[in-house]
Amino acid sequence: MLVTDILAASDISNAIKECQALESFDFKKFFQTSGLSRKSADEIKNVFLAMDDDDSGYIELDELKFFLQRFSPIARVLTEAETEAFLKAADTDGDERIGTQEFVTLVMS
């Protein structure tokens, strides 16, 4: 499944544009602008699956830095600081990776 099967291409484009500059990525704003925060838990889980490149059931740091590129291949890579902040916000159990429920909870918060 592709992210564009769940979110409107125009919303994704607008969300990507808002965070083009380095250090401008705000995950909560991105979730809102892209429409992800208005989706059901099941739809958010499907987006999570698109992020989980190695099908481990988790989004690890090396996958998370490419978060924006999962929405648009021409998007930039997150900086180290943005990636760390995103991980810290989502990783509620401290295992240094984001599980499905952690991602759903973050998106819906």
Image (cartoon, grey):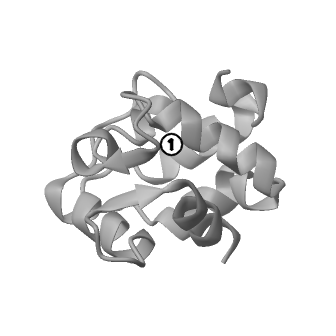
Percent x, y for residue 36? Answer: 71, 52
Splitting the image into 4 quarters, where does residue 40 fall? bottom right
Kindly state the secondary structure of the residue where label 1 is placed.
helix
Say few, some or many: other residues with alpha carbon within 10 Å of mark 1 (under 14 / 14 to 19 / 20 or more). many
Q: In what quadrant of the picture does the N terminus appear?
A: top right
20 lies above or below 107: above
Q: Name which residue type carries label 1.
A: Ile
Viewer-closest of 35 and 104: 104
Q: Is residue 89 left or right of residue 49?
A: left
**Which residue is at 30% across, 48% downward?**
60
Q: Using residue 57 as the reference point, say whether residue 78 is left or right of it.
A: left
**Displayed quadrant of residue 6:** top right
The residue indicated by pointer 1 is 16
| Residue found farthest to the left | 80
* Residue 20 visible in the current orientation: no
Residue 3 x %, y %:
65, 30
Image location (x, y in percent) of residue 17: 50, 44
